[in-house]
Amino acid sequence: MENTLIEKQLKAVADLNRIKLLACMKNGEVCVCDFVDVLGISQPAVSQHLKKLKEAGIITERKVGTWKHYRLVEEQTPLMKGILQQIQPLTKCNCVTDCCHVGGNEDEE
Amino acid sequence: MENTLIEKQLKAVADLNRIKLLACMKNGEVCVCDFVDVLGISQPAVSQHLKKLKEAGIITERKVGTWKHYRLVEEQTPLMKGILQQIQPLTKCNCVTDCCHVGGNEDEE
DNA sequence: ATTATATATAAGTGAATGCTTATATAAGGA
DNA sequence: TCCTTATATAAGCATTCACTTATATATAAT
């Protein structure tokens, strides 16, 4: 891996709130509204964090009606594979709102 | 690993210059003067980078006369093990100055 | 003791970061 | 169409960061 890509991905995950976002997504897709509850920060702040993770190639999104579901990309770099292994899944963010039961999030496990 | 420790170590390595410092130290001990040449930044700037890596438990130091040699700590966290695997060694910083041949850096490989 | 060398710390500065509130965009339902 | 809901973007602000130059500390040599 290029050092510049390593730096970009490390910068993207070197933040406690973004680590928590990744911890949430280890269980599957999560919608933005749930992230807001988990982190206790504003919705725009969550959007900005998700944008950084997406630009680093770590997560991807899927639109479901008005909602947007985010998940880890399948093909992670070796760097990210190792890092994600060390982040413990956060189960309490598992899509408590209606949105996540609309577009087919039930087949995750 | 605790999320806060993960964050601390990720923040410590999420910088291109500090990634290069680690790349240098993959070959063994390096003294500060050599880092200055490799990075092309001032000596105080190098000192400050090294301090961050040390405070994150990633590197350690050894005093050799007036010089100070830095190296990766032997016991890395699983997180750091994975990250260090992805950083390519930088050979051009391999102690060209006298200092590194004083305290016994020859038995590295 | 004085001087020189290697490194660390202090202080200052511009750029980047992470948050906020306000607003824009997009989709769904009345 | 109009209103509501979900998310993204814009703008502003306080904090952090990475650098610089200047200075302090520590060791070695004269």
Image (cartoon, coloured by chain):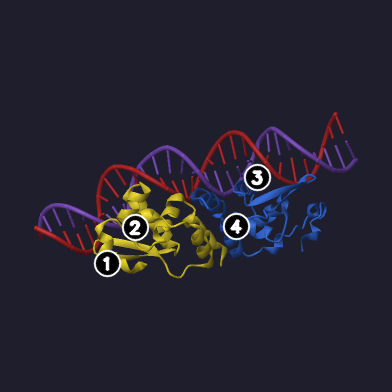
Chain colours: A blue, B yellow, C purple, D red
The disc numbered 4 marks a residue on which chain?
A
Label 2, secondary structure: give it: loop
Check disc 2 and give the amino acid type. Asn
Q: Nearer the viewer, mark 3 or mark 1?
A: 1
x%, y% of residue A77? 59, 55
Q: CA distance from mark 3 to mark 1?
A: 55 Å
User: Residue B106, located in which quarter of the rendered image?
Assistant: bottom left
A63 with respect to A75 (left or right): right
The residue pinned by badge 2 equals: B94
Q: CA distance from mark 1 to mark 4?
A: 41 Å
The residue pinned by badge 1 equals: B103
Label 3, secondary structure: give it: helix
What residue is at 68 percent from the left and 49 percent from the top? A60
Q: Nearer the viewer, mark 3 or mark 2?
A: 2
The residue pinned by badge 3 equals: A44
Q: CA distance from mark 1 to mark 2?
A: 14 Å
Q: CA distance from mark 2 to mark 4?
A: 35 Å
3 and 1 marks on the same chain: no
The residue pinned by badge 4 equals: A19
Q: Nearer the viewer, mark 1 or mark 4?
A: 1
